[in-house]
Amino acid sequence: MRETVDTTVIQPDWLYRSRLGGLFLRLIIRPFVSKIAGWFLDRRISKPLIKRFIKKHKIEMGDYLPAEYKSFNDFFTRRIRPELRPFDPSPEALCAPCDGAVTVYPVTREGKFTVKGFEYTAATLLKNEALAERYLGGLCAVIRLTANDYHRYMFPDGGTRGEHAYIKGKLHTVRPYALGRRRVFSENCREYTVLHTEHFGDVAQVEVGAMFVGRIVNEEKETFSRGEEKGRFEFGGSTVILLLPEHAADLDEEFFENTAQGKETKVRCGECIGRAVRNIL
């Protein structure tokens, strides 16, 4: 059994529960605030934050490749030792593209799925109705990263790149309480790429920005291999969403059971989270 996070006992974020918090929230979710924060975190003057962050989050620096960090963001996007995030080599294995906490949701034949009481659609997430039709009856896997997770993300399978787009938006936090107060995934800045994968058909991988994470940095690769780096988030927590076509994969049952109980399931990048149903190419 994997480790879980019970989101039903997480304390409310003051930004989303009080009038004063709401006023402050209107300011800090604006992209220009994240740009200012990003400017500071890219500079050498941010280096003193590194030691404090390591101590607060109990980060084991021996897990990462040695480096001389020039700024806090340089540290935040540090590279882990490859042997600590091996990808399942089984062709039928659907691998987690990043570290994080997973919840999974069936997508109805109308393209709808519900997260924390809010109804979403594949069309509003992707801002592309024609593309959304590929995921009717499929699955949506949400992988939420926290500040101390590894913030580089990978391709879950080999293949070629299809449609891709950046969607402008706000920058709410992706903490569980906020997800129960706003339609965060359809309001926040996000970028999607359709991956024409070898074993799972057309998978839409969506990177969602979060508070103080205005920059989603993706590599421009037309072809890719399983486990190859796709991109990175800069400072803060954020989210990677996988939209899977109908009959593309069976995800592990514990994800569905835990999601129904209000729990997230912790996974590591490269870990098998499901299996291909059949070759749908």
Image: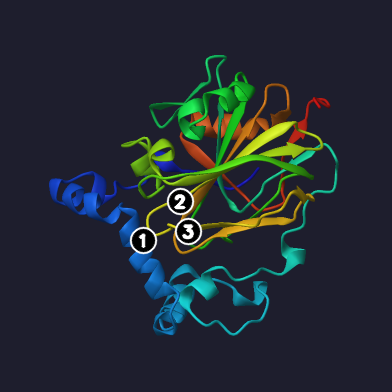
Rendering coords of residue 66 (x, y %): 66, 81
Among the 4 quarters of the image, the one containing residue 244: top right
The answer to whether marks 3 and 1 mark residues whose Cβ atoms lie closer than 8 Å is: yes
Q: Give the side of residue 17 with respect to residue 185, left or right.
A: left
Characterize the local packing of mark 1: few (<14), some (14-19) or many (20 or more) Cα atoms within 10 angstroms: many
Which colour assignment does the render follow? rainbow
- Let me know if residue 214 appears in the view: yes
- Number of other residues with Cα within 10 Å of mark 2, as a class: few under 14, some 14 to 19, many 20 or more: many
Instruction: Tell me the kind of residue under disc 3.
Output: Arg
**x 47%, y 61%: residue:** 147
Locate the N terminus and report the quarter of the image it occupies.
top right
For the residue marked with disc 1, what is the amino acid? Answer: Ser
Instruction: Identify the residue under disc 3.
Output: 215
- Mark 1–mark 2 distance (CA, rounded to whole Å): 10 Å
Give how far across and how far down residue 177 sits, in percent: 35, 43
Q: Which mark is residue 34?
A: 1
Q: Residue at x 48, y 32 (%)?
A: 127
Q: Secondary structure at mark 1?
A: helix
Q: Position of residue 33 (x, y in %)?
A: 31, 61
Amino acid type assigned to the residue bearing label 2 in the image: Gly
The answer to whether the residues at label 1 and label 2 have Cβ atoms under 8 Å apart is: yes
Observer able to see residue 106:
no
Contact? badges 2 and 3 (CB < 8 Å): yes
* Chain-order first, disc 1 or disc 2: 1
Pinpoint residue 89: horizontal percent, then vertical percent.
Answer: 84, 48
Q: Give the CA distance from mark 2 to mark 3.
A: 7 Å
Q: Residue furthest top?
A: 109
Question: Residue 116 is drawn in which quadrant?
Answer: top left
Residue annotated with mark 2:
209
Q: Say if 208 sits above or below 53 in the image.
A: above
Secondary structure beneath dot 2 equals: loop
Write down the quadrant of residue 203 in the picture. top right
